[in-house]
Image: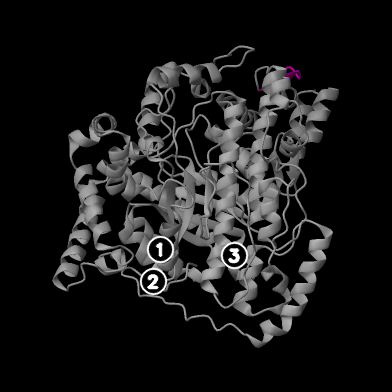
Amino acid sequence: MAFLRSVPRRCCAGKKMVKCGASPLAVISFLENAAVTTAAATVTTTAAVTRTPPSLRLVAQVRGYATSPSSSSTAAAAASTDVKKQRQQQQSAVPRQIDPLDLKFNDPIAAFKSKTTMELMRAYFVYQMCSIEYVVENNMKVMKMAKSVLGEKLFTKLMKATFYGHFVAGEDEVQITPVLDRLRQFGVKPILDYSVEEDISQEEAERREVQASVSEAGDEKREGPLKKYHVEKSFADRRYKVSSARTYFYLNEASCERNMDIFIRCLEAVAKDEIRTLRLKYPSQNITTNIQVDHHPGDIFAGASMGMGITAVKLTALGRPQLLLQLSEVIMRARQYTSDVIGGEGAVLAHHAKLDDFKKKFEEAHIKDTEVQKFLQKIQSDKEGVIHLFPWSGILDENYELSETFQVPDIKTGKMVRLMSQLTSKEEEMFRNMIRRLNSIVTVADNLDVRIMIDAEQTYFQPAISRLTLEMMRKYNTKKAVVFNTYQTYLQDAYNEVKTDLEQAERQNFYFGAKLVRGAYIEQERARAAAMGYPDPTNPTFEATTESYHKTLMECLRRMKQYKDKGEDPKKIGIMVASHNEDTVRFAIEKMKEIGISPEDKVICFGQLLGMCDYITFPLGQSGYSAYKYIPYGPVKEVLPYLSRRAQENRGILKKIKKEKRLLLNEITRRIVRGKLFYKPKGNYTPV
């Protein structure tokens, strides 16, 4: 217990942050609109701060806010003296370059103008290797053998010249700077991810997962659909049949603290990126904000990576999986309880049941116990009906005891029944630690004007992940979409889940952010459902998944249009179309045009992985659309599991590789024929 309360941490963003002034976005607004009123954001902040935690000091310095009264007054004086100069030096920005978009994505020049010829040759070689079954099937063995034969230095050089160089941006945030600068020049923004993964055996993975998925108070296994929310040893290695997603295995609370620290450092890196972007875009402006973050000698985060971006976060990195399993089971049991009492099906909110409906049912059952009245008082509702059976804001912000809170009156007996099995006091503390870590990350993101995308995971975790993410949205997405949830459209209930969450956002008046993906766990989900005997949650075919994706996207677009037509802010909904499928990207663009949503509205963006589908990402960015690349980085020897998954994923999309190889070959041939073998990429595009 003492350990759980006293794990040392570098930043606790849950505490009150330094009060901040203008954000990097405000600086952008000043530069683009020549608004003199935000001149203070361009003042140099160089005061040494020794006791402010790095992320807090970064917030202060990014926002042009001095961390001491004296430096604050100095900054204000300096800002006022600059007003006349800035009025006289009106910045005439270089006209933004926008190219026409080939919706067939068949233009090799547009696809690869951001690449040198050597990079194109490397890409072609890598894709060729990814087409060889034996190499892909045994890629980890091949890499480890090469390392033992060549030695670490030669192996590192070989990897940087091939797979690592193609799929990973660099070892640290200094080395990835040229990659991010190049992306920006060609209209593309980064999603930073420190992609170091543990390379542990299947036996170790199973041992950790089983141990961390069962309460010390015991595991009350159930029959029927709810059995999925209990660990099954044969599927405890969550990497099974998963090639496109990273897996975290719980070790202890200290490892979760380290994961939180890494996520926060990624946020800091993106924020520093914002400042440098401004310097490059407006070189004649006096943007001299100094961002300094303390680091240890040899720290991989010692540099600055630059760009407007996002950070991805996995909740399984922040806490014990047992808690997510139990919370997911509670949510599904609450849905079943609502159906039993009121009728209907789906999420509690989707029933549109009134609080009086519950009161009436209890009166009819002659249930008037004091505990029942307390239960009714805690139900969250509005004029349209019940939103939640439980006070989630209290659970997350006021440290309610979980096992005591998640109780409902039995409609037959009137007695209060627990929906969650008993937790030990240590496990209750672990839950509060997990929420604190998540709050810390999102608070830093909010203060640095960086967005957080919470990744989707397996269906037995997902109800809890989505519920916690929606609560973070309710808390932080009050003026902009800071937190985004991820929806896997290979799941049969994806459309209904998005529809329900959109309704909650509207009723509770917060900004809704969603990343739409096809999904990463389909084979594992099918195998686990078959083995454990519960209904398969996935769509039966690829076509059904595509239909689900498009239907879900259309629901979001329809709601955006409603906001626009009513004169409300269409940015109340923000969507990332995260897909390597060009048909889906084309569908999104065509529907945007149909309903009158332009790229400048900044409500739809597109995302692909670094080293994959460049023929989609770069033409989008160069045509004025908001386009992102997911940017992994980390030391060569520690990202081998990531590279292994990329090789396997590319094998699974041979049709796309075939097209990309054809376009690569066309562009390489064109450059050789036209004497442009030593072509140097330089773009003048501005990311949206």
Rendering quarter of residue 25:
bottom right
Marks 3/1: CA–CA distance: 31 Å
Label 1 with label 2: CB-CB less than 8 Å:
yes
For label 1, the residue is 182
The three-letter amino acid code for the residue at tag 3 is: Pro
For label 2, the residue is 683
Relative vertical location of residue 393 with respect to residue 621 in this rendering, above or below: above
Secondary structure of residue under mark 2: loop
The three-letter amino acid code for the residue at tag 2 is: Gly
The residues colored magenta run 413-419
110 to the left or right of 56: left
For label 3, the residue is 570
Residue drawn at point x = 51 percent, y = 42 percent: 455
- Based on the picture, tell me whether residue 417 belongs to the magenta stretch: yes
Marks 1/2: CA–CA distance: 8 Å
* Disc on the earlier residue, 1 or 2: 1
Where is residue 236 shown, x and y percent of the image? 44, 21
Residue drawn at point x = 50 percent, y = 17 percent: 210
Label 2 with label 3: CB-CB less than 8 Å:
no
The three-letter amino acid code for the residue at tag 1 is: Arg
